[in-house]
Amino acid sequence: MAGKSLLNSLADAVNESLTGCILTYPHLELHASKRVVLKPTWNEPSDKVSVISGGGSGHEPFSAGFVGDGMLSASVSGSIYAAPPSGHVLHAIQSVSTNNNAGCLVIIPNYTGDCLNFGLAIEKARYLGIKVSQVIVGEDCSIPDDEVGRAGKRALPGIILVLKVAGAVAQEGHNLEEVTNFAQMVADNMASCSVGLTACTIPGQGRMFELPEDEIEFGQGLHGEAGYKRIKLQSSSKTTALMIDTIVKALKLVKGNSVAVLVNNFGGLSQLEQGVVVKDVVTQLENMEILPLRVYAGLVMTSLDSVGVHITILKIPENHKTAVINALDEKTDAPRWPGCSYSLPPKYYNAPAKEEKLSKILVGPSLTTEQEKLLKICLEKACREIIEREKIINDLDRGCGDGDCGTTLKHLGEGILSTIDKLPLSYPSSLLSELANIAEDHMGGTSGAIYSLMFTAAAVEMSKINNAENWLKVWAQVWRAGINGIMKYSKAKLGDKTMIDVLEPSLNELDKNLSLSYKEAARKVAICAEQRSEATKHMVPRAGRASYVKQAEYLKGIDAGAFAVATWINAISEAL
């Protein structure tokens, strides 16, 4: 079964994508019939070496995204996962050699089709009298050396570092031999390793292969091909450690070595996960006392919609350290190079400011020892019930929210339980203030703000209480303040299909039963809460994220926030 895609025509996809690139970066020039992208000054007289690269499409932004002063003079794109024809490569070489006798370096990704077609174009160019040199890049180290076939190691995103260094050295005015030697030196001192979480989907076809939910491909290729081996899915840290270990052995890295790091996103990995991988790579290298002098990350050489990550490490030779770093830092107009001025380490280090802890001030009325014990039991019971219902609440939130309401409330429950013996339970106002802090720190997002706001408003009201003879009345008064705090800032009203639809009626029920015992009043409130929670099934959301969802099939369930409130109210009732 073919996967979903946003294309007009599969046959025109590459040309239309290149047109989109040129429309985004209109200084670049596209020779559409040859799928060649050139920098703006390609036909102006120049005495600087030109640098060319390319390969099959489907790896965007490689290679057109790296055209510009300081990187490529021109790029050549083939069809999806297919090498460009030699005639197109020759056109690129001839174009950049217009009014330029300094020569052209062609950087070739080590795949059979690319080597054949680029090689043929190079021989034709030499026959025409054009000075041309070549560097073939293949740095994949996921396959052990004794198992690598005759074709050699595959090219992976490390080629981007070769393009950057070669382009910078060429821009500085070095001759063709020097530029070629620098590019070769970089190619010889780097290694890349990858893991894939999913295969890619070639437009018009299905996935290249299927992976079980608990497995990943170690050494997955750039063209949708399976990896060297299939391993179990682990944490980012453990998976990164496997790749780092493989690269360290391939490059024979030791303590004190300087390196540059490139983390490439296959295309479908979230930016959140990408950032975690970058953190893990740098942390692990630093723990080995290997020095990551430059770190780059992003979408540089993708594999369509595949989910995965490459790690490339360039071992910087000591005798060329300054030159390599300068070349990496050199400004380029290439629009998709991931480095910028912020990639350079700062000249001074700002130590993170220490957070000041709020002083634990005990304010408002206090509880007796027995009341304190009862309050603790209620808190523990409410927290445990919320934690236990995590999946149910998440499922309720999935249709018209982001499916994490249960998880954020679980974080609140766990945060409270982890500090419950340290909380000022005998002073409810101070306790509510601490609960507000826990909600903010552990929940985050909208839920954290709502609960923190409710606890804060309640704490303020509790601090004003002078007469606490009737605690049910006090809690009702404080509860009202908490609800008012939520409604003031969230704009939610009764009937909007939110937690207010349980909080407000339940409080009204408590107000009607203030003369009863704790147990009797709580039971009536719990019954009301359950009924009002169930009633949200038939409401239309008018507040919160759910209010943006208009498809009826996603709006039929109980509101997740309302269900959560009913859960902890019922837990308190049972505890009493």
Image (tube, rainbow, N blue to C red):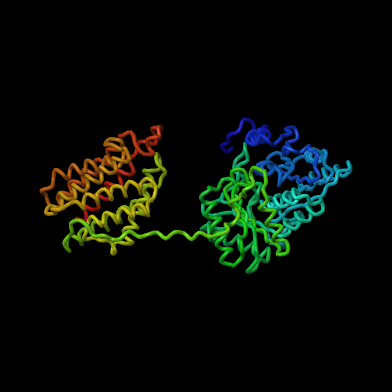
- The residue furthest top is 8
Q: Quadrant of residue 511?
A: top left
Q: Quadrant of residue 45?
A: top right
Residue beneath the point at 34% across and 43% down: 560
What percent of the width, then of the height, locates residue 147? 71, 60
What percent of the width, then of the height, locates residue 328? 67, 53
The image quadrant where one finds the N terminus is top right
Q: Quadrant of residue 417?
A: bottom left
Judge left or right: residue 362 versus residue 294.
Answer: left
| Residue 382 visible, this orientation | yes
What percent of the width, then of the height, locates residue 526? 21, 47
| Residue 113 visible, this orientation | no
Residue beneath the point at 14% across and 54% down: 468
Judge left or right: residue 308 versus residue 477.
Answer: right
What percent of the width, then of the height, locates residue 26? 66, 34
In front here: 76 or 481?
A: 481
- The residue furthest left is 515
The image quadrant where one finds the C terminus is bottom left
In front here: 120 or 99?
A: 99
Q: How many marks?
A: 0
